[in-house]
């Protein structure tokens, strides 16, 4: 997050995206006015068919073919809500010396097909992020490092697990609480190894404020993810 993203502690963040700047609308509610956020559409009775049936997904995080960490999703139900817990632990070192460390914990609460609340805590190699949010009055409202934000409309988080990820032009950053404009195209259908076995998956490429290659299997589960690291190396998430 840059200085232009935050006005002052305790005030509402203004998200600077070209299409919103042209409209001269402040705040994430501008996304809904611009038609970038998905329409209001609770899943209703169909919600049970739009969430993963697995209890967990576990990925090894690889760099140059070496395992540098783990990325895990845990799915559960709580008082009728659908809960997604995300845990990421990455450490890169040389000769026993840690050069880079990244940890992330997040919890998404989904109610009647809507993202009802999201909390996260991230340590990005010493830079700390804390996001707390809850849906109120038709918008997801909260704070990131004590700076307020609100996002109206149907919100898809950038955790990538949601099957509507390839359909949306805007993803909500679970680490820094920013909305991010993305373009997605279908690359094709490919065989991807999952837990040692080939599995057919659709390969999507996300570009823009988030760059990811994501493979979704026939059940819309994430089969594989790749993305560039800050140093230009390729990071791969291999599902176990």
Image: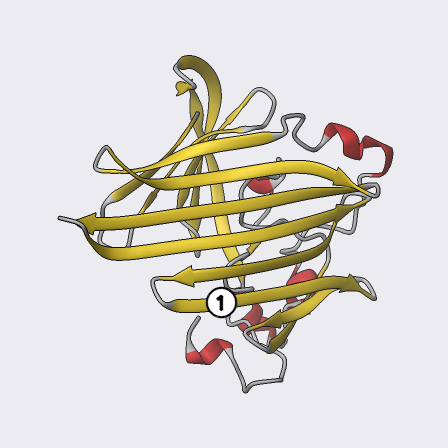
Name the residue furthest front: 96
Determine which residue is flagged by label 1.
Answer: 129
Q: State left or right for residue 44 relative to residue 117.
A: right
The answer to whether one can see residue 168 in this image is yes
Helix, strand or loop under label 1? strand
x and y percentages locating residue 117 in the rendered image: 71, 56
The residue nearer to you, when weighing 162 against 108, is: 108
Q: Residue at x 55, y 38 (%)?
A: 73
Q: State left or right for residue 78 relative to residue 108.
A: right
The residue nearer to you, when weighing 62 against 99, is: 99
As displayed, is residue 220 above or below residue 233? above
Name the residue furthest right: 45
As displayed, is residue 153 above or below residue 71? below
Q: Residue at x 38, y 61 (%)?
A: 124
Quadrant occupied by the N terminus: bottom left
The residue nearer to you, when weighing 23 against 66, is: 66
x and y percentages locating residue 58 in the rendered image: 48, 32
Q: Residue at x 75, y 28 (%)?
A: 49
The answer to whether one can see residue 170 in this image is no
> How many numbered dots are placed on residues in this image?
1
Q: State left or right for residue 136 relative to residue 13.
A: right
Name the residue furthest left: 95
The residue nearer to you, when weighing 191 against 111, is: 111
Quadrant occupied by the C terminus: top left
Q: Residue at x 37, y 55 (%)?
A: 102
x and y percentages locating residue 135 in the rendered image: 76, 61
x and y percentages locating residue 174 in the rendered image: 55, 56
Residue 46 location, quadrant:
top right
């Amino acid at each position: 997050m840059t200085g232009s993203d935050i006005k002052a502690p305790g005030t509402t963040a203004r998200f600077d995206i070209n299409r919103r700047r042209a409209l001269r609308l402040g705040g994430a509610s501008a996304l809904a006015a611009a038609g970038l956020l998905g329409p209001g559409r609770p899943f209703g009775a169909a919600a049970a068919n739009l969430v993963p049936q697995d209890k967990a997904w576990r990925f090894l995080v690889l760099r140059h073919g070496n395992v540098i960490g783990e990325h895990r999703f845990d799915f559960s139900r709580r008082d009728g809500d659908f809960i997604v817990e995300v845990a990421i632990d990455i450490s890169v070192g040389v000769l026993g010396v840690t050069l880079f460390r990244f940890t992330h914990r997040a919890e998404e609460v989904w109610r009647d097909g809507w993202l009802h609340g999201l909390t996260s805590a991230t340590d990005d190699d010493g830079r700390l992020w804390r996001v707390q949010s809850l849906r109120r009055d038709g918008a997801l409202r909260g704070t990131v490092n004590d700076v307020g934000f609100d996002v109206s409309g149907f919100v898809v988080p950038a955790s990538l697990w949601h099957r509507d990820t390839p359909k949306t032009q805007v993803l909500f950053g679970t680490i820094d609480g920013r909305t991010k404009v993305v373009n997605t195209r279908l690359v094709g259908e490919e065989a991807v190894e999952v837990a040692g076995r080939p599995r057919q998956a659709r390969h999507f490429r996300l570009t823009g404020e988030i760059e990811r290659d994501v493979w979704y299997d026939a059940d819309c589960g994430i089969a594989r993810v790749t993305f560039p690291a800050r140093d230009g190396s390729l990071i791969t998430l291999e599902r176990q």
